[in-house]
Every structure is written in C-alpha cells, then in structure tokens.
Image (cartoon, rainbow, N blue to C red):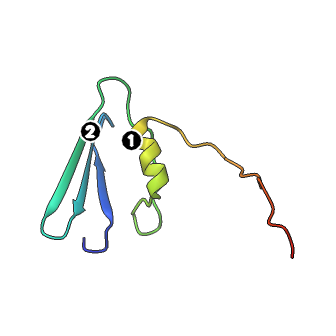
Amino acid sequence: PASGDVYVFFSKDRKTMKALKWDGDGFLMYTKRLSRGRFREVLKKGDDGVRRLQWDDFYMLMRGLTPVKVTVENRFRMAAK
C-alpha cells in the first residue's frame, strides 16, 4: 500500500466501484455508484491475476469515456542553431 498504488474493486454487476488508497496515515476509500449504465471492462488479467491500469485510463473509466487510439502530431520544431 505504501507504493502509492490504488486498488480498485468492482461489484459483480459493474455498477459500483470502490478504490482504496493509502494516504500516509490511513486508508482512503472512494466509492462511485452509477445510476445508469455500467463500468466498462478494463484490461484483461495478466499472468499474475492482476489487472494494471494507467492513471489516464482510470480517469477516463471514471468519466465514462472509452479510450481510442490517439496519435500525437508534431506541432512545432525547434530551430537549429
């Protein structure tokens, strides 16, 4: 828990999510219950039985967004001296 990881748990019907995080002197628990719809399926389990999620993906999951492939274009170039 001291690593800063957040542990996320979903109900069987995927309408409720609980997140558990150590904040230095105790645990914080966040709960989110959806009034409509369900949380989308997150990454498939790895060999160790754990699903890993980056913070950006977790944020989109909480907002109800589905990530798609995004490409970043170079917007400017530094002038060569």
Q: Residue furthest top?
A: 36
Give the residue type at disc 2.
Lys
Q: Residue 18 location in percent, x, y? A: 25, 47
Give the tally of numbered discs.
2
Q: Residue at x 31, y 60 (%)?
A: 6
Q: Mark 1 or mark 2: which comes first in sequence? A: 2
**Left or right relative to 51: residue 73:** right
**Residue marked by disc 2:** 32
Which residue is outermost to the left? Answer: 26
Q: What residue did someone put label 1 on? A: 62
Q: Residue furthest right?
A: 81
Instruction: Please name whichever residue, 43 or 21, is drawn nearer the observer in this view of the structure.
Output: 21
Q: Where 39 sits versus 7, above or below?
A: above
- Residue 49 % position (x, y): 39, 63
The secondary structure type at the circle numbered 1 is helix
Give coordinates of residue 67: x percent, y percent: 56, 43
Q: Residue at x 26, y 38 (%)?
A: 32
81 or 23, nearer to the observer: 81
The kind of residue tagged 1 is Met
Q: Position of residue 21 (x, y in %)?
A: 24, 61
Residue neighbourhood size for the residue with mark 2, other residues' Cα within 10 Å, grouped as few (<14), some (14–19), many (≥20): few
Q: Give whichever of 47, 16 is nearer the camera.
A: 16
Residue 41 visible: no
